[in-house]
Amino acid sequence: MEAPQYVAARVQQALAEDARTNELGIRVDIRGDQLFLRGQVSGAAQRERLSQVAHEAAPDLRVHNEVKVVDVTEPGEDEHLD
């Protein structure tokens, strides 16, 4: 069986390089046969794509997606400093 740190590195690389996700800031933790994804993304669809790519990269592990979806809105009015 492959060492957990190597599996985590492989999944992180897949999340960063896969065109569906391109995510660098997602933390991957392995505990036994469980894979945990943690971090923040800007949409629910992106969160689901992370689960899909992680499962493809480590199909023998049960994926727990703990990634939070943050609300990213357009900036308000300009701030003027005097």
Image (cartoon, helix red, strand yellow):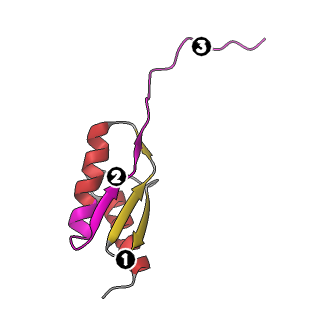
The relative height of residue 62 versus residue 19 in the rendered view (above or below) is: below
Q: Earlier in the sequence, mark 1 or mark 3?
A: 1
Circle 2 residue: 22
* 10 on left or right of 71: left
* 23 on left or right of 62: right
Label 3: which secondary element: loop
Tell me which corner region of the image, top left, top right, bottom left or bottom right, holds residue 77.
top right
Judging depth in this view, the residue of 33 and 50 nearest the camera is: 33
Residue 20 visible in the shown view: no
* Separation of residues labelled 1 and 3 (CA atoms): 50 Å
* Percent coordinates x, y for residue 7 in the rendering: 35, 75
Instruction: Identify the mark at residue 63; answer none if there is no mark.
Output: none
Circle 1 residue: 32
* 44 on left or right of 40: left
The residue located at (39%, 57%) in the rendering is: 37
Number of numbered tags placed on the structure image: 3
Membership of 5 in magenta stretch: no
Label 1: which secondary element: loop
> Which secondary structure is most common in the magenta stretch?
loop
Circle 3 residue: 78
Q: Give the range drawn in magenta.
A: 54-82
Q: Quadrant of the N terminus?
A: bottom left
Judging depth in this view, the residue of 39 and 74 nearest the camera is: 39
Question: At label 2, which amino acid type do we have?
Answer: Asn
The residue mark sitting in front, 1 or 3, is 1
